[in-house]
Amino acid sequence: MIEYYFQDQLRWSFGFENPNKAAALIASLLPLLWIVAQTAWRIKRPALRWPLAALGAGAICAGWWLLFMTFSRGGIMAAVAGFLYIGWRERHVLFARDNRARQAVMLATVLGIAVLFAGTNAAERSTQWVTTREGSVENRFELWRGGLQMIAQIPQGVGQGKSGSAYMQWFQPLESKARYRTLVNSYLTFAAEQGLGVFALALLGAAMLWRWSDVSNTGWMGAIMIGARGSLVAFAVAGFFSTTMEEWMLWIVPAVCGFALLLGVMRHHKRRAIGTTALVAAIISLACCAGLYAVGWIAATRQPVKISCCGEEVRIEPEGGAHGRDFVFSVDETVMGEDFGKLLRRLAIDRIATVHVNGSMQSQNQVFVATGETASRLSSEKQGLSLVLIAPARIETSDAREILKNAKSVTLLLPSFDDDGRVSFWKEAAGETGIKPLQLEGVGSQVESAWDELVKKL
């Protein structure tokens, strides 16, 4: 397991793969702990009420201390959001004039949390990005902008677990080398992977539960519902700053809270009309999705290329056209490298060509580009067309001759180092068909480092 540090202090992760997930769990539990602690004030005997109130305040401070030891800024903001919601809903109790004792305990608890915040250096990490340029924050903004573009340009979704790789290939700035598995935001990751339609349905369900459960329960049931909603607020805010919602264990607390909300609705004699609730929830869901799409579309219009996706096929189209050139690439990563998408985007950004990746030939004017092992997939369907072969792997000799002989035109690009015999093989096949191969200087079978030279020969 990877260990995370802030300066020389270990960030506690409590068994999770990173501290942000641990922080999301603690943040969602703290509002429930606060509600439990408030039960002390329902006890009429002072001899029991005051010790229990002090114990509850201490437990809350201990919970915040554990949260601070994760050094998770998102987790801290999530817990603050949950407590602000509870404070707003309980303001008539907390700020009542005849409630001085409870207010004193509350003030002492807040001061204790503040002291812990400063003493654990969590305050320094939480404010560090304001005074110092920090890659963790700046990269998030760049990543989220790319995620919004992805949602707008590929609204049907890129597929489960593919948001990070899709971003790096098609939306990450060409000069950036940061690696991502997700979009480091639970909502953007879900919307980008599953599509705006599925995301809208998920938002609809969440909004319906929230709206339907907003009833005026009193007594212990009302306190439970307020605590449950505060916990859900904290969980929702934590998901904004990291991909915490992919961890199934973190959904246990929200599931319990959701059940508590439904139970509260069932016990309340004045329930919201389900039709009205569904209508309002649908408006909220559509508004959120429209907002995401609009922001992503605006961000995409400022980019030099347009990205579209249909299944496994990706189309990269330069703004203003590409002077009639149209390449269909069949990619072998062992030849083009793991960042092949950035190489192909450069063709479109420089307006050299429109690029189709893993697509099929749609026109005789297109050029089919096979790389590495994908040369073995060339069949009679590709014959009679213009071909570019980039460091193609060895195939059957008769197939190689047939491909070179029957193509309308062939550009054969071979490495200068013959790592596995492919260079000599294709030179021999090219010699028998009268084709002169072009050599890429200084590279073996992986041609990424010679891309600028390669582009000039296309």
Image: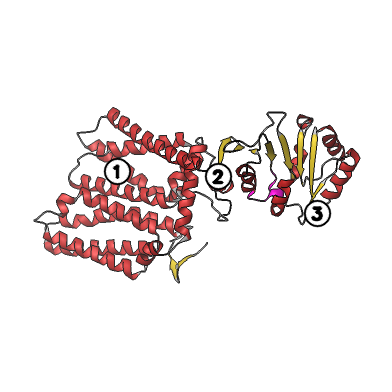
| Residue 88 position in % (x across, y down) | 22, 49
SS at mark 2 in the image: loop
Residue type indicated by callout 1: Ala
Residue type indicated by callout 2: Lys
Compute the Cα span from label 3 to label 2: 35 Å
Residue 162's tag is 2
> Which callout, 2 or 1, points at the residue further toward the start of the chain?
2
Colour scheme in the image? secondary structure
In the picture shown, does residue 111 fall above or below 277? below
> Which callout, 3 or 1, points at the residue further toward the start of the chain?
1
Q: Circle 2: is it few (<14), some (14-19), or many (20+) Cα within 10 Å?
A: some
SS at mark 1 in the image: helix
Compute the Cα span from label 2 to label 1: 35 Å
- Asked where in the image residue 281 lies, by quadrant, the reply is top left
What residue is disc 3 on? 416
Q: Are marks 3 and 2 in contact (CB under 8 Å)?
A: no
Q: Nearer the viewer, mark 2 or mark 1?
A: 2
Residue 68's tag is none
Residue at the far left: name it.
98
Q: Is residue 337 magenta?
A: yes
> Which callout, 3 or 2, points at the residue further toward the start of the chain?
2
Point 20% across, 41% down: residue: 217
| Residue 186 position in % (x across, y down) | 44, 47
Examine the rendering and report whether any part of residue 334 can be seen.
Answer: no
Compute the Cα span from label 3 to label 1: 68 Å
Report the span colored magenta.
331-339
Q: Circle 3: is it few (<14), some (14-19), or many (20+) Cα within 10 Å?
A: some
What residue is disc 1 on? 260
Q: Nearer the viewer, mark 3 or mark 2?
A: 3
Point 76% across, 55% down: residue: 443
In the picture shown, does residue 287 fall above or below 110? above
